[in-house]
Image: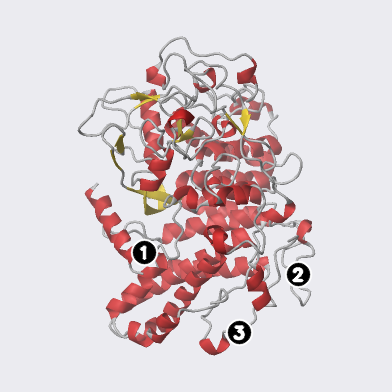
């Protein structure tokens, strides 16, 4: 713990060191370039800013106010912050990317980060005070981060201009067109490959959280998986997305080899001995309990452990305050979980949950306490007998839970999300929960809050940019897409490892309580069935880790009549309910309306940007 606290302080001190279009530069910065690179102190400060809050994405800081990646999909129903409904209801347009919408417009900011990397790379040689070892390492990291910022723009805005060097003031009016997707990917991968030899194998206790060779290899695997996916791989929807010279920006022919490359890149990480799944450990001579699995899953994203490949410290203060139900904190669990996600978790025996609507056809509640497995008497049966990840990740009605403070260590609360309950709408002054559930995942295990005392405590956590659990699922997906049924014996152990450490059995086919191993033995397990199992597993395992937003897009399943982001999401009727078994509350009520059209796969560049840079063609269909 002392090492992790030290690492947080180091990283946070880095974060504190801190026109008209995306090529604009800060004149104050430019006027001081020679001075900056004349001494190692200022050079290091300039380098450190590559990781600063000015540029680096922070998924938990500010929470729903700024992060549509975390909330702009079918697992969340945050209706209280203007940014999220703008995304969910398809209101983003080239004319609405600035002003009130700047908090969800990352195009300019990430290009500023790229410019910052380029200026460093072009000038670091001037600093003669830097030793060769320091200089080589910082150059490698700057190249890696330049590649990452390009990738973070590409995954939302599609093929983009590659910026290999900073633009000088005399070239401020330069017109730059988009590179093709293939050119972008070649640049990103080549930069990562060039950077890896100069990056650290591991980090010392002073700088945990900064990227290593393993982090670079893992992000390379993620890039390759992304561009192998249906949105990017031979998608003829984008046949007319061209530069002014007629260059087609997206590849028009499907290339199965991209899946093979993604699988091979993921396997490199899997074979690295320093990364291991975090698994629950029983006390000497004791059996593992259900709670051990719950606590272990909570620890994956909130403690420093060997599963984390790249994890950067993030404050959880906003996240906790917006996830804690009103009985704990006055912000009233404004970050709401949909019933759709809640029902995606498996039953404790590993089987698929019944269809969502079936829980409401004959409403039932538990008749006895089962605190060992996470529920008490009078709990809606939808939440009884679920897998440990459900209880580790969600606050739900009638949950018995504690975030006790040191001065009041015995306080436990029953969460009452129904209208007249202690966390219900009647107790809210404005902010309120909209579904009857809120996230528990990513809340530190030692976070405390006591509304009666008017105080709370949170801390920084090593929120995973990427972890081994994702790499396992990336590998399984890429292998299945390339080899189909032939590889199922190879990938099953990785699916089993994810599910067994979560405290459940191997997966099942939709609508059938059959073990995957049995189906494989009979030769009746298809590529399509495996695809769905992997996708279902990703939704649960990687919930609230900024995966779902991009997954449903790269799979090209968000649009259309039955599109994932056109399908209604549901919560309970939070305007009703007097007690724990009040049927009026336990009624499905539709959440924020969802509108996702074909243009929404790629975000638009601002109209003013395209007007200034006339070679920069707009994203399709806007």
Going from N to C along the chain, the mark reached first, 2 or 3, is: 3
**Which label sits in the foreground, 1 or 2?**
2
**Mark 2 sits on what residue?**
242
Mark 1 vs 2: CB contact within 8 A:
no
Residue at 28 percent across and 60 percent down: it is: 10
Image quadrant occupied by the C terminus? bottom right
- The image position of residue 436, as x and y in percent, is 51, 29
Q: Nearer the viewer, residue 137 or 354?
A: 354
* Occupied quadrant, residue 567: top right
**Which label sits in the foreground, 2 or 3?**
3
Q: Nearer the viewer, residue 342 or 145?
A: 342
Residue at 43 percent across and 10 percent down: it is: 368
Residue 541's tag is none
**Mark 1 sits on what residue?**
200
Q: Distance between the Cα atoms at labels 2 and 3?
A: 22 Å
**As drawn, is 482 to the left or to the right of 102?**
right
**Mark 3 sits on what residue?**
173
Whether residue 279 is visible? no
Vertical placement of residue 193 versus 583, above or below: below
- The image position of residue 440, as x and y in percent, is 42, 36
* Occupied quadrant, residue 157: bottom right
Q: Distance between the Cα atoms at labels 3 and 1?
A: 39 Å
What is the total number of numbered labels drawn onto the structure image? 3
**As drawn, is 357 to the left or to the right of 31?**
right
Q: Residue furthest top?
A: 367
Vertical placement of residue 267 versus 512, above or below: below
Q: Secondary structure at mark 3?
A: loop
Whether residue 240 is visible? yes
* Occupied quadrant, residue 203: bottom left
- The image position of residue 474, as x and y in percent, is 56, 47
Going from N to C along the chain, the mark reached first, 1 or 2, is: 1
- The image position of residue 398, as x and y in percent, is 44, 22
């Amino acid at each position: 713990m002392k090492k992790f606290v030290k690492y947080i302080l180091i990283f946070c001190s880095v974060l504190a060191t801190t026109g008209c279009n995306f090529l604009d530069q800060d004149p104050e910065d430019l006027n001081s370039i020679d001075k900056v690179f004349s001494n190692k102190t200022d050079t290091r400060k300039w380098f450190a800013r590559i990781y600063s809050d000015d540029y680096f994405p922070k998924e938990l800081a500010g929470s729903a106010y700024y992060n549509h990646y975390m909330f702009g999909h079918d697992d969340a129903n945050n209706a209280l912050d203007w940014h999220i409904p703008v995304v969910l209801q398809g209101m983003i347009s080239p004319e609405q990317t600035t002003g009130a919408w700047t908090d969800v417009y990352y195009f300019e900011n990430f290009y500023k980060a790229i410019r910052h990397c380029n200026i460093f790379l072009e000038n670091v040689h001037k600093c003669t005070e830097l030793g060769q070892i320091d200089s080589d390492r910082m150059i490698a990291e700057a190249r890696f981060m330049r590649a990452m910022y390009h990738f973070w723009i590409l995954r939302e805005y599609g093929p983009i201009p590659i910026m290999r060097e900073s633009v000088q003031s005399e070239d401020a009016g330069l017109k730059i067109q988009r590179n093709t997707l293939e050119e972008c990917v070649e640049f990103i991968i080549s930069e990562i490959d060039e950077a890896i030899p100069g990056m650290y194998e591991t980090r010392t206790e002073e700088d945990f959280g900064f990227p290593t060779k393993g982090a670079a290899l893992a992000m390379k695997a993620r890039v390759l998986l992304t561009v192998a996916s249906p949105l990017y791989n031979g998608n003829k929807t984008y046949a007319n997305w061209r530069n002014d010279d007629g260059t087609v920006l997206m590849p028009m022919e499907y290339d199965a080899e991209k899946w093979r490359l993604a699988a091979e890149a993921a396997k490199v990480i899997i074979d690295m001995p320093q990364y291991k799944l975090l698994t629950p450990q029983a006390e000497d001579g004791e059996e593992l309990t259900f709670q051990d699995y719950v606590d272990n899953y909570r620890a994956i994203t909130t403690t420093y452990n060997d599963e984390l490949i790249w994890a950067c410290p993030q404050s959880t203060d906003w996240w906790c305050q917006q996830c804690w139900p009103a009985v704990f904190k006055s912000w009233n669990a404004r970050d709401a979980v949909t019933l759709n996600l809640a029902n995606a978790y498996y039953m404790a025996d590993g089987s698929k949950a019944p269809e969502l609507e079936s829980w409401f056809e004959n409403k039932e509640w538990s008749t006895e306490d089962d605190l060992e497995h996470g529920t008490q008497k009078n709990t809606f049966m939808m939440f009884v007998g679920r897998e440990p990840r459900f209880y580790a990740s969600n606050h739900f009605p009638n949950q018995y839970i504690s975030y006790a403070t040191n001065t009041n260590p015995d306080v436990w609360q029953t969460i009452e999300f129904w209208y007249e309950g202690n966390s219900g709408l009647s107790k809210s002054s404005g902010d309120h929960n909209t579904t009857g559930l809120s996230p528990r995942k990513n809340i530190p295990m030692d976070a405390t809050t006591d509304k009666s005392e008017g105080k709370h405590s949170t801390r920084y956590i090593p929120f995973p940019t990427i972890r081994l659990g994702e790499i396992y699922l990336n590998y399984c997906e890429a292998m299945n897409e390339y080899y189909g049924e032939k590889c199922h014996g190879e990938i099953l152990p990785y699916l089993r490892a994810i599910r067994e450490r979560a405290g459940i059995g191997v997966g099942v086919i939709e609508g059938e309580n059959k073990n995957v191993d049995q189906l494989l033995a009979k030769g009746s397990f298809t590529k399509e069935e495996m695809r769905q199992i992997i996708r279902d597993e990703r939704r649960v395992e990687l919930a609230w880790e900024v995966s779902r937003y991009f997954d449903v897009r790269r799979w090209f399943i968000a649009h259309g009549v039955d599109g994932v982001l056109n399908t209604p999401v549901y919560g309970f009727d939070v305007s009703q309910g007097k007690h724990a078994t009040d049927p009026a509350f336990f009624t499905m009520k539709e959440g924020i309306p969802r509108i996702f059209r074909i243009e929404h796969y790629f975000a638009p560049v601002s109209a003013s940007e395209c007007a200034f840079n006339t070679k920069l063609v707009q994203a399709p269909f806007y």
